[in-house]
Image: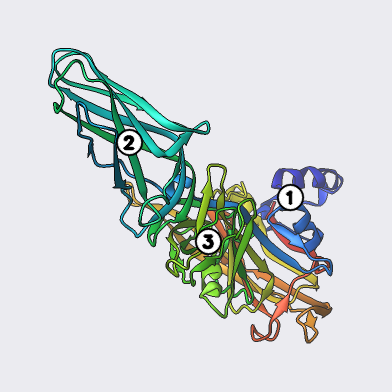
């Protein structure tokens, strides 16, 4: 109570007794009063926490877990899984008066042992040159005998109007190649050339020409796509594990899992090597060490396949990875195509083919923790007491009665901090004082780690004159709670939605006011 308010209450008494007052001894008069006031009566269940935070979910039996799920952290397109580079220029000589000429070439690939049998182009160009040795226009036909367009053999007319070299390009989008017609049974290009107009050149006149397939984009492909690696794009994903944002150390989640799944309709077996780095709020990075995951692929075009890998404490360092409390996870990796080589079963892919990798992080709150620290800093702390009011407090005591349905002990430490400025821009917070209290006694748990019987504990924090002075003068207040699971952190406990806590707190204040 403020001193001015206290005097207002005493005015009637002073007036009635004015004749008996000795004003010479006024400095010796003091008022001493004491109040015990309830300040907190609060209930909390973990069901309230789960309902208010989408990161948490509850099992049918009430067990709580944290779930982070992303259906597609990265994927790969047909252009990344199978590609055809620009082809070398092929020389197509022909001679006036000669019959049609048939030429065969091997399709250029990426050099990883590809053996392509059928391809369909969504885009592509046929670039050509024609050297005309005569003054009149010349014209010839180039047919790709093992390629069709709308069901007919692909045929193109190439013309040079004047003496010299003419160039041009033809759109070959939609061409459907059967590359099995050569002696190898794959990667075969088969051309036929014939003169349509020799420009009146004498028989035996030689014409030089080149053709080149470039800018090829596949719509479909069939065959063996080779044994090579494809880098996957890197990305960083926020986990939204907000329930752990204040945890500093001591957390040990016993049975977390990460499930990776590959879903696709791509007829191409591959192995995925993933690089996953967990990055916590303090910037600490911890890699997750895991084995590759194999995608076996569907056998028939149009079918889908889902391959899975479950990462647990038995095959990885996931316990340490989750204990690092990753705020973000950085993903990267690569695909190793056909890791078993050419098995004789053709690969296939279509333009609408899909392949993506999903992840699900599952953290059941099955915990064994010793000296788990949770801190909350109040950066601008001011009780707004003037000097007279500060001196008026003779004793301050806080009482707690806690009915604890959580499987944790808890010790509370309040740290009073002052801000110190050295005058050259360096500001530091110094702990000037602190008080401690054993706040919670763990509930008793059964053999499975579930709370069996809540406990009731009573405790108090006593502030002496020095504590009170330091508290009232503090610029910041740091609240630090240290948790230990049941049996001093040696037993595994599980958290359920019906775990609860009830806190009743009161404050005992004794004032000393000089009148």
Tell which tag, 3 or 1, sits nearer the viewer.
3
Local crowd at mark 3 within 10 Å, few (<14), some, or many (≥20)? many
Counting residues from the start of the chain, the first of labels 3 and 1 encountered is: 1
Question: Relative to 391, is 202 on the left or the right?
Answer: left
> What secondary structure is marked by label 2?
strand
Residue 1: mark = 1
Which x, y percent locates residue 263? 60, 56
Residue at the disc numbered 3: 326
Q: CA distance from mark 3 to mark 2?
A: 63 Å
Q: Name which of mark 2 and mark 1 comes first in the sequence.
A: 1
- Secondary structure beneath dot 1 equals loop
- The answer to whether mark 3 and mark 1 are in CB contact below 8 A is no
Q: Which residue is mark 2?
A: 192
Residue 36 in view in this figure: no
404 on left or right of 356: right
Looking at the image, tell me whether mark 3 or mark 2 is earlier in sequence order.
2
């Amino acid at each position: 109570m403020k001193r001015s308010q206290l005097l207002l209450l005493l005015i009637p008494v002073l007036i009635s007794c004015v004749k008996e007052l000795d004003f010479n001894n006024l400095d010796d008069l003091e008022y001493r009063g004491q109040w015990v006031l309830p300040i907190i009566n609060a209930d909390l269940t973990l069901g309230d926490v789960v309902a208010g935070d989408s990161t948490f979910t509850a099992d049918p039996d009430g067990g709580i877990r944290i779930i982070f799920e992303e259906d597609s952290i990265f994927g790969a397109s047909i252009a990344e899984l199978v590609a055809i580079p620009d082809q070398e220029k092929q020389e197509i000589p022909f001679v006036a008066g000669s019959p049609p000429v048939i030429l065969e070439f091997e399709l250029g690939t990426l050099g990883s042992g590809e053996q392509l049998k059928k391809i369909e182009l969504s885009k592509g160009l046929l670039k050509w040159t024609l050297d005309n040795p005569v003054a009149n226009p010349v014209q010839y036909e180039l047919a790709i005998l093992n390629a069709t367009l709308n069901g007919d053999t692909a045929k193109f007319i190439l013309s040079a109007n004047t003496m010299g070299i003419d160039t041009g390009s033809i759109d070959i989008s939609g061409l459907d190649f059967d590359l099995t017609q050569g002696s190898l049974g794959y990667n075969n290009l088969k051309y036929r050339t014939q003169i349509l107009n020799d420009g009146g050149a004498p028989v035996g006149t030689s014409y030089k020409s080149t053709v080149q397939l470039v800018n090829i984009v596949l719509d479909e492909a069939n065959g063996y796509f080779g044994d090579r690696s494809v880098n996957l794009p890197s990305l960083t994903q926020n986990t939204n594990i907000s329930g752990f944002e204040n945890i500093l150390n001591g957390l040990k989640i016993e049975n977390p899992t990460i499930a990776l799944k590959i879903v696709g309709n791509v007829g191409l077996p591959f192995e995925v090597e993933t690089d996953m780095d967990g990055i916590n709020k303090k910037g600490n990075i911890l890699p997750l060490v895991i084995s590759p995951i194999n995608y076996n692929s569907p056998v028939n075009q149009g079918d889908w396949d889902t391959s899975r890998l479950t990462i647990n404490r038995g095959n990885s360092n996931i316990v340490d990875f989750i204990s690092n409390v990753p705020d973000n996870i950085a993903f990267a990796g690569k695909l190793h195509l056909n890791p078993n080589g050419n098995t004789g079963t053709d690969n296939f892919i279509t333009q609408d083919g899909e392949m993506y990798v999903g992840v699900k992080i599952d953290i059941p709150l099955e915990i064994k923790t010793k000296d788990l620290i949770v801190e909350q800093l109040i950066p601008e702390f001011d009780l707004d007491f003037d000097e007279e009011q500060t001196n008026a407090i003779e004793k301050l005591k806080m009482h707690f009665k806690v009915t604890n349905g959580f499987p944790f002990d808890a010790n509370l430490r309040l740290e009073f901090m002052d801000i110190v400025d050295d005058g050259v821009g360096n500001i530091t917070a110094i702990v000037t004082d602190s008080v401690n209290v054993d706040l919670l006694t763990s509930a008793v748990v059964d053999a499975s780690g579930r709370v069996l019987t809540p406990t009731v504990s009573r405790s108090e924090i006593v502030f002496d004159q020095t504590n009170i002075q330091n508290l009232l003068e503090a610029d910041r207040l740091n609240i630090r709670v240290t948790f230990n699971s049941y049996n001093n952190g040696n037993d595994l406990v599980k958290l359920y939605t019906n775990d609860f806590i009830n806190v009743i707190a009161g404050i005992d204040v004794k004032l000393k006011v000089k009148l």
